[in-house]
Amino acid sequence: MTLTKESFYGTLPQSSDVAKADMNSTREKEEALLQSVTRTGAVVPSKRAVGRLIMHSMAMFGREFCYAVEAAFVTPVLLSVGLPKNLYSLVWLISPILGFVLQPVVGSASDHCTCSWGRRRPYILGLGIVMLLGMALYLNGDVMISAFISGRDKQRTWAIVITMLGVVLFDFAADFIDGPIKAYLFDVCSHEDKEKGLHYHALFTGLGGALGYLTGAMDWGKTVLAHSLASEFQVIFFFAALVFLICLTVHLRSIPEVPLRYENEETKFLLEVTESYKYSSIEEEIKNGYLKSTCTEIKAATKPGKCTITSPTEDQRQMTFKSLMKALLSMPPHYRYLCVSHLFGWMAFLSNMLFFTDFMGQVVYRGSPYAPHNSTLYLTYKTGVEVGCWGLCINAVSSSVYSYVQKILLPYIGLKGLYFIGYLLFGLGTGLIGLFPNVYSTLALCSLFGVMSSTLYTVPFHLIAEYHREEENLKLKDGDPSGEHGRGKGIDCAALTCMVQLAQIILGVGLGLLVSVAGSAVTVISASTVALIGCCFVAFCVRYVE
């Protein structure tokens, strides 16, 4: 067969075909890179591997491990430095008050963070560092002060100050970090993966708490590390810091975030998408509140790999605060009802957990913390406290197990059933413990604490994800990109987390007075009453997406 000149040129693609193929190839690469773009310019997340979700959940493991260490050691530490009793309430109130005031601000700030590393991870890293700093201060403050200050009176005063500062910093950061972690999960996962991720969070929260309580129950004073370091508290800090650093590093490297910044290439692609997919333009998105930036800010975006922190003017601060308050006050009623139910749940749960070991020592074992330390009453009380720690360990293990049971029950009873059962079982369990204080029945009923814990860590955030998904679907259905939606997932998660701090404030002010008047038995009865009230609220007031 002879190849003629005409046939040769006929086999070559036309220049227009080549250009079209190049354009199609470029478009495919862009679509493969960004997958699909929503009305807000956000990338629809792809399906995540189970290993990535487990890596993401490691932050909850490390956080709860450190929480359990604090629960086991913070009271002995405060007593050992000589903290006056009238300052105890101050220690426990400062952190939740700060958290309640600042949590929405951090949530809103993370919604609009333009760091190239992502919106949530810079805040998670910063709060993790503050957690480590606080833990270092309250576990090692006495040793640090002894090394730098001479004079017993000065040492005692500064040791109290440093230890109190450490407790406040740790509680502040540990409470704060939960909101950005949840928002990070919602940002990078599809709806199905959000469900899995929340269950893994609950699982590793329980495992971290159980390991932390077991670590606190061990006698580290007789180990080799205790002889090498100054005290048992330093050994505990070594293990807690190591576990938390490993978990935080794994978490931060789990799933990459899409940065909320507008570089030239990204702006160019969004403009192309505006034309081809008939989305609203960037300027319109800005006017509608979707892109919280101006065109000049887009041009002045930071270079890749850098985060620039600018100092806002007073007018900008006022506008940010006003916008934040407007977003919070304009929350739809079903968001507010969910926050109220979350408040009831945490008030009930914390009312029981904060005083549980004391309840075991005074009510179940009938000991006394005020008796002489060599007396039978005091030793009996100490035994009750130790058994109470094992009860808290049972609670942590139960929380992990129930996180898997939730996945089985969810298709049959839905979120409403899970929410209702969690509050109901906890209310009945604490009520039975208060009415019939027995060692074995109390330890058995501690498993119901884990049901409540797993419920509080999963179902409300699951509902937030459902609400956001419903709003996005309604916008897609209506084809109206100009809907008002000034809130982001970060501020909604922060609003839920604020309820934990508000519960701590209410309990810190009111429950301590009740305990001093009526004894520790009032704590479990109060927990049961509030949980059953919350149970009714969950059943009749909270809105569930069908």
Image (cartoon, grey):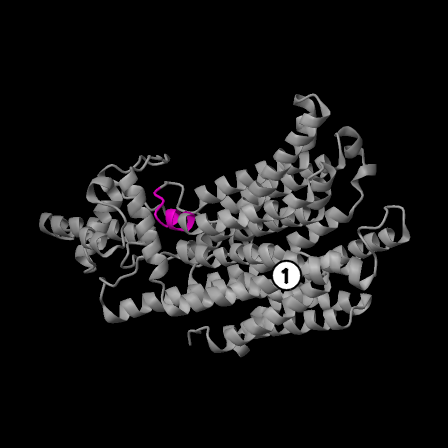
The image quadrant that residue 487 belongs to is bottom left
**Residue 21 in sight from this viewpoint:** no
Mark 1 lies on residue: 351
Find out whether residue 21 is within the magenta segment.
no
Q: Main secondary structure of the magenta part?
A: helix
Q: Nearer the viewer, residue 396 or 262?
A: 396
Label 1 crowding class (10 Å Cα cut-off): few <14, some 14-19, many 20+? many
The amino acid on which the numbered mark 1 sits, given as a three-letter code, is: Ser
Q: Nearer the viewer, residue 128 or 407?
A: 128
* Quarter of the image where the C terminus is located: bottom left
Compared to residue 544, the image places residue 360 above or below, namely above
Residue at horizontal 38 percent and vertical 66 percent from the top: 469
The magenta region covers 106-114
Q: Is residue 244 visible?
A: yes
Where disc 1 sits, the SS reads helix
Q: Is 136 or 11 nearer to us in this picture? A: 136
In this rendering, the answer to whether 184 lies above or below 333 is above
Is residue 528 placed above or below 275 in the rendered structure? below
Q: Left or right of 461: which side holds 474?
A: left
Residue at image point 71% right, 48% down: 72
Q: Position of residue 325 (x, y in %)?
A: 35, 54
Any magenta on residue 109? yes
The quarter of the picture where residue 156 lies is top right
- Left or right placement of residue 161 versus residue 445 in this view: left
Residue 112 in the image, given as x and y percentages of width and height: 34, 47
Residue 86 point in image, percent of width and height: 65, 45
Write the residue at 55% across / 71% down.
Answer: 534
Q: Residue extending furthest left?
A: 6
